[in-house]
Image (cartoon, rainbow, N blue to C red):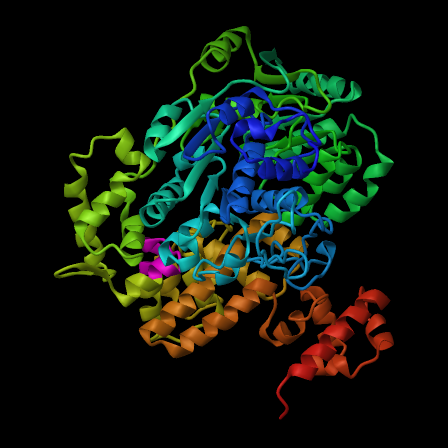
Amino acid sequence: MKEQKCGINFANYGLTAEEASIFSEVFGDIKHLFPPQEEAMRAGILKGGNFVISSPTASGKTLLAEFVMLKSILNGGRCLYVVPLNALAYEKFVEFRRRFSSVYAGDYDYYDYNGEALNSEAYVGDAVSDWDADDGGGRRSSGRKSGGMREAVSVGISTGDYESASRYLERYEIIVLTLEKFDSLTRLKPNWLRRITTVVIDEIHEVCDDRRGERLEGAIARFRMFNQHARIIALSATIPNADEFGKWLSANVVCSDWRPVPLCEDVLLARSDNTIITSVLREVKDGGQVIVFVNTKRGAASFAQKIAERMTVQEELEAVADAVDMGIDNLADMVRRGVAYHTSWLHPEQRRLIEKAFRERKLKVICCTPTLAMGVSLPARVVIIRNYRFFTGLSAERMPVSWVKQVFGRAGRPEHDSLGMGLIVARSIEEMQEIFDFYINGEVERIESRFFMNEMGEQILATIVSGARRKKQLMDFVRNTLYAVQRSSEQIEERLDDILCELARYGLIEIENEIRATPFGTLVSHLYLNILSALRIRDGLRYLSAQHVSDFDLLLLLSDCEEVPKIYVKNALMTATNLTENIEWIYQCGESSVGTALLSHAWVDEMPYAEMKKRFNAYPGEIHAAVSTLEWLSYAASRMASHLGYGELASRLYLMKDRIRYGVRAELLDLVSLRGVGRVIARRLYTAGFRNAADIAHASEEELARIKDIGEKRAKIIKEQALKVSATAPQS
């Protein structure tokens, strides 16, 4: 038997000697347990049962999840790890590969679908929408050898492709999912999902999110209905009403306010921004890092610029600055001075590079909007909330106490700081006292379910599609939610009748001897569409089927869906009249949808980022968010068009999906399918006379290398790709 490598005697926590030896091998870098971890271990988290763990950031919740997952795997089980964001999914995927794989080969880089560099305007999306991440040579787990790991734990990840049951995922022992992918899988209910033995829900407090909470809560309830033996491990930094979560999940509850770095919460009196900037510069000079929260994207960028103007250029940041420079604004100049903004303006690749530089302590200051409070882990010595009131569209309202506590949780880096500092800015003595009373000394709000009965139609439909045939089964589903724990169930049955009648009226279900989804309803649920969006697409397809349809009409059909971020464009309606014959159609859809359609039309027409910023005042991150959603919706609309019998529209929408994905006109689709060829390089190849893979296969590497921005290395890659494609293409 191998000797313990660390200070933890795992045999004391219910493990066999063999299991304890394996734990010691995998977790040899852990010298001791933090108090919340010790409490959970003493409570029997390795022995079985569901658990809710509520403790501050960096207190070791993820390590507890890793303990539970490894124990499950050693007993032949398989695990899901569910997170709210794509970026966080990638972060956990890399983290688990490092932890569990002895043959881990290094970080996975983010590429566009074509492998083209970011600053050549080719980047479209995060790696691939549904990564089939291999575990080091396609090896399959065939059991565990006593006294040590026989082979690496296999780790997979899936963040998209919502219509797919993703059967390839069953080969992995740990599967990282976004909450949307988890939700979609519970609708499709593949057989492999029934064999999952442990589900970790990271950031369980996301059930209170107005936009996504209902989907997470519904997915958990549905999963527990068809897989009752799986353990649920729910993690969160702050759950003031954790006992309710324990009741909902039939779970043991472990709550702790222990932090590895003590936290000081205070108010900074700053009658002007100069006082705040002086405080930031003082911390940076002392070797610290600072995150400043600002209430608008423009405000965050502006404040970052003010700080950067008082810092000096750092030579070590030159490469990072060049990499994030997209010719849009002065972000690169800020980065050279150790400062960056972090908002939805950033392209995913820019965001990844900035976060990496901050973790490596090269960047000293980040100015961000509230979205950074969730997702990837970016701790700093000092966190400053410059604005605690945020605009809701009607007025400026105070952010909840829970948000402030979550933000302050980022203060204090365990390996660098002896104290973390969380500061809220007050502009007067009177405001200081208000902040102390409401935020510093105030109570954190309860986490409330967003599973309201008047918004439950999508989840009821999903549950019917997944197999519920009787009203009693639907009632059981609702009773399995946090909503049912927090509210009286007296009115649930009456409201459920209304929802069923509504779904039937829309043609999504049929109610006779039993309740069944119609083929259309099944398709809507499998496509992971908001019901209102699905109905708009159906109605839009019916209208367009009798019209002369332009590319812009198709993009407007998609842009009018609820899921698409709306982008305001000045004089959008007037501009759109030049792109369609269906004038009534554009006025029906509305100005914000038309604005998004104009932007996406420019994207598929190969307009560069800089020109799109000038014309639409849209940043790369906003463009990416819009086109990523539109790509999926284009596929969904093509499936719906095919189902409804509109074959020509189905074909055009399917083609549009690829044009949106790559941001090109139709003639470039063959070229951008090659690795190393994005929208800019493809257009240069096309202009040089290379129309397809066969043309490139017949060219020399020297010819390709002479084309601007290709060079010898990329020419070799493109040539190899073209030869492979040409070799497998059918002969005419």
Q: Is residue 351 above or below residue 418?
A: below
Q: Main secondary structure of the magenta part?
A: helix
Identity of the residue furthest to the bottom in this view: 732
Image-based side of 374 in relation to 584, left or right: right
Image-based side of 479 in relation to 233, left or right: left
Front residue of this view, candidates 349 and 567: 349
Quarter of the figure with the N terminus: top right
Chain part drawn in magenta: 524-536
Identity of the residue furthest to the front in this view: 1
Q: Is residue 685 visible?
A: yes
Tell me which corner region of the image, top left, top right, bottom left or bottom right, holds residue 505: bottom left
- As for residue 532 lying within the magenta part, the answer is yes
Front residue of this view, candidates 115 and 708: 115
Tell me which corner region of the image, top left, top right, bottom left or bottom right, holds residue 164: bottom left
> Residue sitting at 36 percent across and 76 percent down?
646
> Residue sitting at 40 percent across and 28 percent down?
252
Question: Residue 352: image x %, image y %?
Answer: 67, 44
Question: Residue 278: image x %, image y %?
Answer: 72, 17
Question: Residue 136: image x %, image y %?
Answer: 68, 57
Front residue of this view, candidates 83 and 673: 83
Tell me which corner region of the image, top left, top right, bottom left or bottom right, holds residue 269: top right
Quarter of the figure with the C terminus: bottom right
Q: Is residue 399 visible?
A: no
Question: Residue 325: image x %, image y %?
Answer: 74, 47
Q: Is residue 319 above or below residue 626?
A: above
Image-based side of 72 in relation to 710, left or right: left
Identity of the residue furthest to the left in this view: 513
